[in-house]
Amino acid sequence: MKTRCTLIAYVVISMLGLMILLSRENVYVVLALVLGFLLLGHRELWSLIRYRRLPIIDERVRDNLTGAMRITGGFFFIASIVLIVLLRFNVFKDTPTGLIISGLLVFVGIVYLIGYHYYDRVRPNLGEWAMRWLKTCLITAGLSLSTISLAIALHNLVSAWFGFEDAFFFILGLLVAPGILAASLLGSLAIFIKGLCASFKDVEQA
Amino acid sequence: MKNRMKEYRARLGLTQEKLAETVGVRRETIIYLEKGKYNPSLKLAHSIARALEAGIEDIFILNDD
């Protein structure tokens, strides 16, 4: 009963939100929210259609959800900082804001799905060593992303204050940090794929 | 951690679906447990042992290495 009431409240609020967004002609955001809803709730929707009930949220699923939420929250935070910096430097010239926000929302949905997938299928196939490296790579990626934004801001500040073209923050923000970011992203991707391949092998053997 | 869930389940003629329903988890969780890819909480281990009519230590065996 409690779950049903929560779901009804959620649907009513979502419909109101979508109507407000549509009235403000934010079609891209509405599309992204609908797509995001389908991406995030595909398991629940499938269970409702097939069995006419919501799937059980057991301890394993709860762990996966918590992990995926944590990853998505981190991604959303970092992506928002990067987007703000990019918007500040007018990178998205003549691009509708709705499209930019929609892109971010769709990415959040995809990262959540990967996060959920990662906890569900990849994590059990990774040893302690691989998990430690994965965490290190993800933290390094997050740090280097923040460093890029910070170094660009500091480069502009130093150049404006001292009246000379700063080289240190320029190299840090446009060469060193992006290099580290690329290496850490490639590293985490390689570990993720390794875990995923192992999970496919399990399915074949079953 | 090793376990003998599959063996005990087969002995009782239970399907993964039925066991999942009895202990209140998803079928995928039972699959992961049987493969040793997921370590259950003490509460879940207890429920499984009771559903399989055995002791926890008979079903879940801790590896020393």
Image (cartoon, coloured by chain):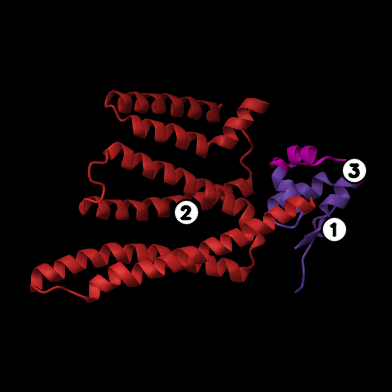
Chain colours: A red, B purple
Which chain is disc 1 placed on? B
Tag in front: 2 or 3: 2
| Residue B53 appears in the figure | no
Total marks placed = 3
- The answer to if B16 sits in the magenta stretch is yes
Q: Position of residue B60 (x, y in %)?
A: 79, 59
Discs 1 and 2 carry the same chain letter: no
Residue shown at the point (74%, 41%) measured from the top left: B20
Residue shown at the point (48%, 45%) measured from the top left: A110
**Dot 2 corresponds to which residue?**
A71
Which chain is disc 3 placed on? B
Residue shown at the point (40%, 35%) measured from the top left: A32
Q: Using the numbered discs, state the Cα–Cα distance from disc 2 to disc 3 in whole angstroms.
A: 41 Å
Q: Amino acid at mark 3?
A: Leu
Magenta range is B11-27
Tag in front: 1 or 2: 2
Residue shown at the point (40%, 66%) measured from the top left: A181
Q: Position of residue A148 (x, y in %)?
A: 30, 64
**Dot 3 corresponds to which residue?**
B12
Q: Amino acid at mark 1?
A: Asp
**Dot 1 corresponds to which residue?**
B58
- The answer to if A135 sits in the magenta stretch is no
B3 displayed left or right of A68: right
- Which quarter of the picture shows residue B64? bottom right
Who is closer to the viewer here, A134 or A100? Answer: A100
Dot 2: element: helix
Q: Residues within 10 Å of mark 1 (few under 14, many from 20)?
A: few
